[in-house]
Image (cartoon, grey):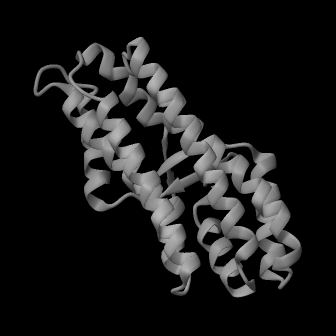
């Protein structure tokens, strides 16, 4: 069995993804970088919505929620601005590499297109065990393992969508440096968010947290 992280894209983003995959097999038409940029920015926004913002909105109103929401929106805006700086006009020959990456970043679960990446089976097994522990009412005991697991999980997602995707772009030295620095900063910010969030969650909040992620971490059909 292959383990995945994958979120269900909005109808609009799914249409753009499907159009990009079709366009990659055609010759002529509008430059491919246009649809690549649309898809890349859409995935960036919806990925962060899925991993952070939707989760924050599950929390009851409090100073904790407000702080997490500000941090999540900061991460989202930072990544969006970075992506806009890295993307732009390019030849179809170069853009094909990005579209091929996109094809590797999608899969189908129960007939529904998902956007994500393959995860190590061992990590998913550990996370599922922690989710089960929380569901059994042992959330407090599960917190240390969950914090470690979610850092590893987010590191893999950031590596895939920033480091690996950026390898498909024709970046100069300065853009590569800027991307590397941004990746490091975002990774640190996410780790801070995890260290602040998970220890502060009560049993009910932990259940909402793990149930949310349980739906987007799965094995292939």
Q: Position of residue 99 (x, y in %)?
A: 36, 30
Q: Is residue 20 left or right of residue 216?
A: left
The count of marks equals: 0
Q: Is residue 142 left or right of residue 3?
A: right
Assign the C terminus to one quadrant of the image.
bottom right
Q: From the viewer's perspective, is residue 84 above or below residue 137?
A: above
Q: Residue furthest left?
A: 29
Q: From the viewer's perspective, is residue 110 above or below residue 137?
A: above
Q: Position of residue 14 (x, y in %)?
A: 32, 52
Q: 189 or 91: which is nearer to us?
A: 189
Q: Is residue 111 visible?
A: no
Q: Is residue 11 left or right of residue 29?
A: right
Q: 185 or 103: which is nearer to us?
A: 185
Q: Residue at the location (60% across, 52% down)? A: 190
Q: Is residue 158 left or right of residue 29?
A: right
Q: Residue at the location (49% across, 40% down)? A: 105
Q: Position of residue 114 (x, y in %)?
A: 47, 53
Q: Position of residue 208 (x, y in %)?
A: 63, 79
Q: Residue furthest right?
A: 141
Q: Residue at the location (79% across, 77% down)? A: 134
Q: Residue at the location (38% across, 27% down)? A: 98
Q: Is residue 101 visible?
A: yes
């Amino acid at each position: 069995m292959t383990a995945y992280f994958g979120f269900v894209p909005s109808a609009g983003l799914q249409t753009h993804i499907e159009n990009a995959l079709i366009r990659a097999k055609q010759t002529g038409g509008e430059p491919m970088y246009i649809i690549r940029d649309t898809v890349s920015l859409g995935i960036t926004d919806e990925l962060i919505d899925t991993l952070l913002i939707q989760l924050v909105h599950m929390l009851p109103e409090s100073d904790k929620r407000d702080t997490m929401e500000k941090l999540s929106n900061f991460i989202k805006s930072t990544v969006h601005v970075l992506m806009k700086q890295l993307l732009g006009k390019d030849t179809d020959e170069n853009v094909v590499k990005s579209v091929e990456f996109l094809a590797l970043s999608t899969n189908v679960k129960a007939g529904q297109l998902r956007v994500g990446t393959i995860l190590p089976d061992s990590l998913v097994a550990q996370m599922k065990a922690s989710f089960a522990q929380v569901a059994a009412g042992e959330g407090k005991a599960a917190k240390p393992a969950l914090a470690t697991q979610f850092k590893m999980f987010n590191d893999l997602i950031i590596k895939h969508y920033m480091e690996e995707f950026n390898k498909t772009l024709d970046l100069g030295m300065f853009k590569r440096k800027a991307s590397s620095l941004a990746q490091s900063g975002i990774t640190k910010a996410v780790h801070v968010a995890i260290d602040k969030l998970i220890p502060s969650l009560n049993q009910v909040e932990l259940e909402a947290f793990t149930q949310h992620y349980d739906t987007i971490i799965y094995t292939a059909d």
